[in-house]
Amino acid sequence: MLGISSQQLFQQLLVGLINGSFYALLSLGLAVIFGMLNIVNFAHGALYMVGAFCAYFLLNELGLNYWFALILSPLIVGAFGALLEQLLLKRLAGLDPLYSLLLTFGLALVIEGLFQNFFGSSGLPYAIPKELGGGRNLGFMFLPNYRAWVIVFSAVICFSTWFLIEKTRLGAYLRAATENPTLVRAFGVNVPRMITLTYAFGIGLAALAGVLAAPIYQVRPGMGADIISVVFAVVVIGGMGSILGSIVTGFALGVIEGLTKVFYPEASNTVVFVIMAIVLLIRPAGLFGRTA
Amino acid sequence: MSDQPQTTRISAQAHSGRDERIVFLVMAALLVAAPLAVYPFFLMQGLCIALFACAFNLLIGYVGLLSFGHAMFLGSAAYVGAHAAKVWGLDPGLAILAGAGSSTLLGVVTGALAIRRQGIYFAMITLALAQMIYFFSLEAPFTHGEDGIQSVPQGMFLHLLDLSNQTVLYYFVLAVFLFGFLVIYRTINSPFGDILKAIRENEPRAISLGYRVDQYKLAAFVLSAALAGLAGATKAIFAQNASLSDVHFSTSGEVVLMTLLGGMGTIYGPVLGAFIIVAMQQYLGQYLGQWVTVIQGAIFIAVVLLFRRGIVGEIAHYFKRSL
């Protein structure tokens, strides 16, 4: 088929799904935060990187393996997120949302600059957990176990989040508070705490993506800055109004990027941005967006 | 306007022409005399980046549009200007025009896309489009990838002015800066500028008054792109190079920082902010290394939390003047 081996096609498809998992987790976190706080969290990429470093420290300083990191890193980085919200973002409530965008951009610079200072720009290796080493031959391709795990686990986390927000009582409170915080407060719900926890949750998702990414890519201070612009494009394409939309768009664009690497490698870095431009022309509100 | 308690929007001070004109004369006089005291290369760097920041400020300060991708205009114009001067052997003036022309075209295309969304989406779209231009610059053959375009000839402007002479070059760059600055000043203080401010303050009302706000936004965007390109192409001629750092995302972030620090929606704020940040990079960069990024981030946080009007904005507010 066009001189491309099916082996290569499936390999890139797999890489695409892996990247798509990270896009989905990150854009989901951005969408959750945006829904509740009405801000774009520019520090999302930086905190994804911190999540990966957190896993690295847990392993090398405390001897806690991957499985502990998978739980602890999102909790630690999420708690840090709650602190940021309490100390900084809270003060910007009621101002033009552009100010919180600028503040979180400043945060990203500080965090990334600090890590760059202490760890340089080269990557630190993080081994694949031994339970997930090796792989299996599917006949048409070789599937490393760890990669299969990342895709399945990300999908489970994404759809659990969707279920939590769209189908449970807690999610109903959350959505109600998004629509009308004053009224929900009048019903006795602690909305400020809900805002803090939502931000922490979104950050936790970013940190989780960082832990998942650590064994695949190396742990690098620049890893967040590399991915964040693509994630923003994903968010523009999907529209931040919809949880399910951001999940589907994330995975789909990862796959499209992977396929582009096979058929037209020169455009693989830019294909997501081109799709964003096309979507803006046809459906300015985004594929799943409710209003412009 | 400045006395109103409402500070939730990024807004400019009211205009009274006299103070602004006095400050302009002081600034022009200082810049004319500056090479006597300060290293000209630093001044030229500061002037080009200051023009870049003023062009950026035209959007954020007067239309309320935050572009997070303005490096694409600076960088693409620098590449085209450098290529025109070096490979085509054009007159430096024509090379700069070619650079500014290319960024104007880029502004038409990207602007038409970006103004389809507002607020934070606008910021994300401009960032993504700029990233696309970055990857294009990385791979297109004429930009020479990681090497960039080096040793661009400064040449003879109109066969009269020898720009390889440092003094002539400085006054040439100063003239370009003052030209760009006055274009922006004139735009802001025109009926067109008033409509831009109306859009910033209340877009639905501007629409209901019958203005086609999208056309005004696009016009402002294209003008901003053109002037950012003028700065970029001039930079390519005086610094004799165009490189990936000109189109890099960090340059887009820095211009936001300069404008925020100096004062968004003030006329002189971006100039001051640009000189402060360029001085920090030039004189402290060698001691601070990567700490420059941390300090820049800390400045962002400090300005947003403590003095949102920026340095010039706070001064103007204190004296109840517009600057």
Image (spheres, coloured by chain):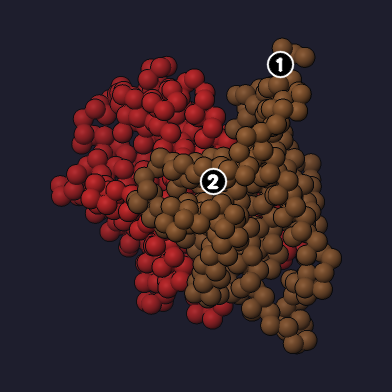
Chain colours: A brown, B red
Output the chain of dot 1. A
Q: Residues within 10 Å of mark 2 (few under 14, many from 20)?
A: many
Q: Earlier in the sequence, mark 2 or mark 1?
A: 1
Q: Give the image location of residue A134, x and y in percent.
A: 62, 34
* Nearest-to-viewer mark from 2 and 1: 2
At horizontal 53% and vertical 40% (from top left) the residue drawn is A217
Q: Pick the quarter of the image with the C terminus of chain B.
A: bottom left
Q: Is residue A256 above or below residue A209?
A: above
Q: Please, which residue is most extreme toward the right here? A: A167
* Residue beneath disc 1: A4
Question: Quick check: A78 left or right of A58?
Answer: right
Q: Say which element carries label 2.
A: loop
* Residue B211 screen position, x and y as percent: 71, 56
Viewer-proximal residue among B71 and B9: B71
Could you tell whether B32 is left or right of A172 in the image?
A: left
The dot on residue B181 is none
Q: Dot 1, crowdedness within 10 Å: few (<14), some or many (≥20)?
A: few
Q: Nearer the viewer, residue B278 or B218?
A: B278
Task: Give the spatial CA distance, label 2 vs label 1.
Answer: 30 Å
Q: Residue at x 49, y 74 (%)?
A: A87
Circle on res. A214: 2
Identity of the residue furthest to the front in this view: A131
In the rendered image, the vertical position of residue A89 relative to residue B252, given as above or below = below
- State the image coordinates of residue A272 (x, y, percent, origin top left): 66, 37
Helix or strand or loop: what does disc 1 sit on? loop
Q: At 72% across and 12% down in the image, what residue appears?
A: A3
